[in-house]
């Protein structure tokens, strides 16, 4: 086994620095020295649900960048020292219809998640990127384009590909009218990507407080969801509404903003929702969702971001401040993504 150091859950509100074991390299594995790891809302939810009575350890972190520190004997696509990125999926069955279509994120037997997942060969629990080293199949690691800063690129591997998937599948491009509801970790990347794709892009937020931020990100306008007049004026306006709001909320006001034959795509809140059929019927509107992305889409997203200077707006903290980062994330005190510098684990 390989030994490294990382941050393991010590309860629902804290992590402790500890020694971790990684598997010895299989023929198609690479070892990644993790340099930067993003802090995702999913990490927060996993920690809050964690119990010390759980047998499997929890090490969060599923959006990270680093350099190759070792390769298995059959690996030909990477060399030691290469810059790489890893996201929230590290394996899949490879043979179902979804995997064959390049949508490993929808694997029929469920993809192996970067942490809290079950390794498909030995049944062990995967431990995430809040650590100095991670071992992963080479096909689920991605070359990090030279045009991307490794710290700002880390959130692209979860938040970025999550918004990229619907933008691309819904055909967003020049002439498209896109609205992004919620301006957080997901939302700010959705704005940047929609603008880079050529869409006229609007932010929907509760108040006008983020208007300047929206403009800096490239948005053309901001609508306050609490202003009934603004919402009424924007009715039937947008081809695509990307909804990144993480809390339960009424979808009806957002469906009213969707143009005829347009789509409301839910990305932030994935729990039960209630929709009046007439809100879809009037205008032939569609309701969809998306999550993560397959290998082809992830590689495409990284290159697009490099070509168009798209990266996350981040605040970098030493990994020793992970508890502070999670506490601030609970209070939405971040613009717009925390990234942990893992070098202090040496």
Image: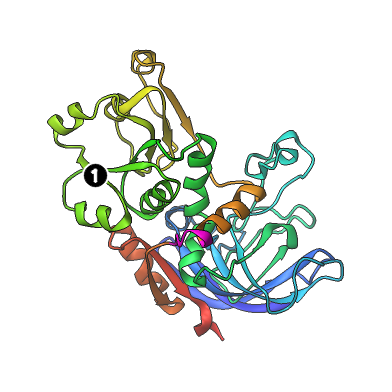
Query: What is the magenta range?
Result: 306-311
Residue depicted at 38% across the width and 55% down the height:
185
Relative to 174, 125 lies left or right: right
Q: Residues within 10 Å of mark 1 (few under 14, many from 20)?
A: some
Vertical order, 245 against 346 (above or below)? above
Residue depicted at 25% across the width and 57% down the height:
213
Vertical order, 44 against 344 (above or below)? above
Relative to 68, 209 lies left or right: left
Residue reaching furthest to the front: 174
Residue 42 picture location, percent across and down: 46, 53
Residue reaching furthest to the bottom: 346
Q: 227 or 63: nearer the eye?
A: 227
Residue 17 picture location, percent across and down: 51, 77
Relative to 187, 31 lies left or right: right
Vertical order, 184 against 283 (above or below)? below
Q: 212 or 271: nearer the eye?
A: 212
Q: Quadrant of the N terminus?
A: bottom right
The quadrant where residue 94 appears: top right
Q: Kindly tell me whether residue 52 is visible in this rendering.
A: no
The way the protein has been coloured in the rendering is rainbow
Q: Quadrant of the C terminus?
A: bottom right
Magenta: main secondary structure equals loop
Q: Kindly tell me whether residue 131 is visible in this rendering.
A: yes
Residue 274 picture location, percent across and down: 37, 24
**Element marked by disc 1:** strand
Q: Which residue is mark 1?
A: 221
Residue 183 picture location, percent across and down: 31, 50
Q: Is residue 187 in the magenta section?
A: no
The quadrant where residue 144 appears: bottom right
């Amino acid at each position: 086994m390989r030994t490294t150091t990382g941050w393991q859950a010590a309860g629902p509100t804290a992590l402790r620095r500890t020694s971790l074991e990684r598997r010895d390299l299989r023929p198609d594995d690479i070892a990644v020295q993790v340099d930067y790891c993003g802090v995702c809302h999913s990490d927060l939810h996993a920690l809050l649900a964690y119990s010390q009575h759980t047998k499997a350890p929890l090490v969060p972190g599923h959006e990270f960048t680093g350099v190759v520190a070792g390769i298995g004997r059959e690996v030909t696509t990477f060399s030691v020292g290469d810059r790489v990125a890893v996201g929230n999926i590290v394996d899949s069955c490879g043979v179902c219809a979804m995997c064959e279509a390049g949508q490993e994120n929808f694997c029929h037997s469920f993809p192996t998640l970067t942490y809290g997942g079950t390794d498909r060969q030995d049944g062990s629990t995967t431990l995430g990127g809040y650590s100095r080293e991670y071992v992963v199949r080479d096909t689920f690691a991605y070359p990090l384009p030279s045009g991307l800063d490794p710290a700002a690129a880390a959130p692209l591997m979860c938040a970025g590909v999550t918004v990229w998937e619907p933008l691309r599948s819904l055909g967003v491009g020049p002439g498209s009218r896109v609205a992004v509801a919620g301006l957080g970790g997901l939302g700010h990347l959705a704005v940047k990507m929609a603008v880079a794709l050529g869409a006229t892009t609007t932010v929907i937020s509760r108040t006008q407080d983020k208007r300047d931020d929206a403009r800096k990100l490239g948005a053309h306008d901001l609508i306050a969801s609490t202003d009934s007049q603004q919402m009424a004026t924007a009715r039937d306006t947008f081809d695509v509404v990307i909804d990144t709001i993480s809390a339960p909320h009424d979808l009806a006001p957002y469906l009213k903003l969707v143009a005829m034959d347009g789509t409301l795509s839910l990305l932030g809140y994935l729990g039960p929702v209630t929709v009046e059929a007439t809100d879809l019927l009037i205008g032939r509107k569609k309701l969809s969702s998306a999550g993560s992305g397959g290998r082809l889409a992830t590689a495409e997203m990284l290159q697009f971001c490099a070509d168009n200077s798209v990266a996350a707006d981040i605040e970098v903290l030493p990994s020793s401040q992970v508890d502070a980062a999670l506490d601030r994330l609970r209070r939405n005190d971040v613009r717009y993504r925390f990234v942990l510098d893992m070098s202090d684990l040496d």
